[in-house]
Amino acid sequence: MNDPTLRLRRILLVDCDAFFVQVARLQDPEGAGRAHLLLVGGSAEGRGVVTSASYACRPFGVRSGMPMGQALRLCPEAVVVPVPRSACVDRSRAVRDALGDLAPVVQAASIDEFYLDLTGMERLLQGESLGETAERIRNRVREVAEISVSIGGGTNRLVAKLAAGRAKPAGVHVVPSGEEAGFLAGFGLREIPGVGPSLLEALERRGLQEVRDVVGVEEEWLVRWFGEARGRWLFERCRGIDPSPVVAEEERKSISSERTFSRDVSAGSSGDRILERHLLQLALSVGEGLRGRGLRARTVTVKLRDGDFTTRQGSRTLPHPMESDRILYETAGELLAELRRKRRAPTRLLGVGVSNLSEEAVPRQLSLLEEEDDRTETDRDRTLSHLGDELRARFGRKAILPGGILAEDREEDREEAREAGGEDD
């Protein structure tokens, strides 16, 4: 049964339709703008991957994240253009600004998705239904930012997110209060945000493939199978319950992520491997947060708290703003290695942060004596990082991860326990 307090909320998700395709067409109306079959990302020679595909390409089987060579074999008539990144940031900001004039609380979930909380505005909107409000917002964004959007609405973020998918392209879909559970029942478990491959596999082993299958299971059994936090989360989400708030974010001066270990990580080489794996996880989290806000950073910081609670950190300011996971992780890795060399001690906490943020890339031109090297961020680095964000948002946190951190969480805990001299539960 749904929590009745959640029915008072009026939440919308504004999702820009094939955002990179739209921006590419706006940037080049005589070229990309005339291409019915359009692929953004990679190259016309088949290198790289598809960042976004026009809706006309999708019946051919083309999708985001697909190697460009494969996409062109499926849809050989498609025109390929690069990702217009700075223009995407500008258009995203224009959408955000337009929404800020229409709703009191706006939260950017990514460069092309925005949650709105309209709770308590019923009197101001003079009885306008949530669907009518969504349609008005959709038209206004199109007029002001020249971007077509789809809008989903409901009493919480989960319902609004799934409803936006049903609204595509360029439509509105609102789930009335009290109908959340029935709406969720029409989805497969793989479609629920946060249900990643490992959880999906565990569910399928128990014959659970659809949301309605989970609804028939008592909460006690879900907790027994998947643990208290995950079991309760699954129980609620499959009934359309999601208490997570929409939070208006202030301008960020830094973005960081930390991990406190249940047991101190050893000072030896085996501890180095554990820290490197967690450093990669933290770098992915920070990078995703950076790109989701349309930002780039010049300064990378790594923080260590030793077993005796001594806190140390190292920072490096790069010559050019970056946003990719590769550059962030490699820089952080060098800082971590330097901190570990200076003092060999068990580690209690590891953190990664970025600062010196900017919304746009600073134009860069190589001199005749300067050459690109492995430390230079490339368009490929940025494309792969954005695609990773998109796939994890769609299929769960473990949908796409580097090989170094594919181990199951429990196996990681076992390894840390062994290194600390402890035992498994």
Image: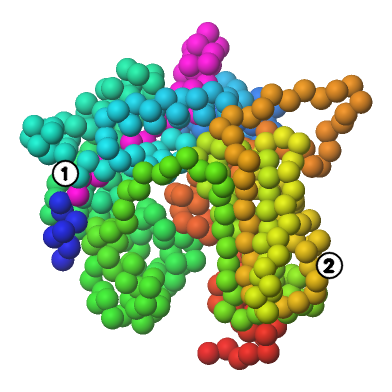
> Under tag 2, what secondary structure?
helix
Viewer-closest of 161 and 99:
99
Question: Which stretch is magenta?
Answer: 9-38
Lateral position of residue 232 relative to residue 93, left or right: left
Q: Which residue is mark 2?
A: 341
Query: In which quadrant of the rendered image does the N terminus lie?
Result: bottom left
Residue 301 falls inside the magenta stretch: no
| Residue at (42% x, 25% y) in the render | 94
Determine which quarter of the picture holds residue 3.
bottom left
User: Can you give x and y, in whole percent of width and height, for residue 331 in the image?
Assistant: 74, 51
Using the image, tell me which numbered label, if any, was put on residue 85. Answer: none
Mark 1: give few (<14), some (14-19) or many (20+) Cα within 10 Å. Answer: few
| Residue at (31% x, 53% y) in the render | 245
The first of marks 1 and 2 along the sequence is: 1
Q: Which residue is mark 1?
A: 120
Viewer-closest of 163 and 43:
163
Viewer-closest of 14 and 122:
122
User: Can you give x and y, in whole percent of width and height, for residue 399 in the image?
Assistant: 52, 56
Determine which quarter of the picture holds residue 419.
bottom right
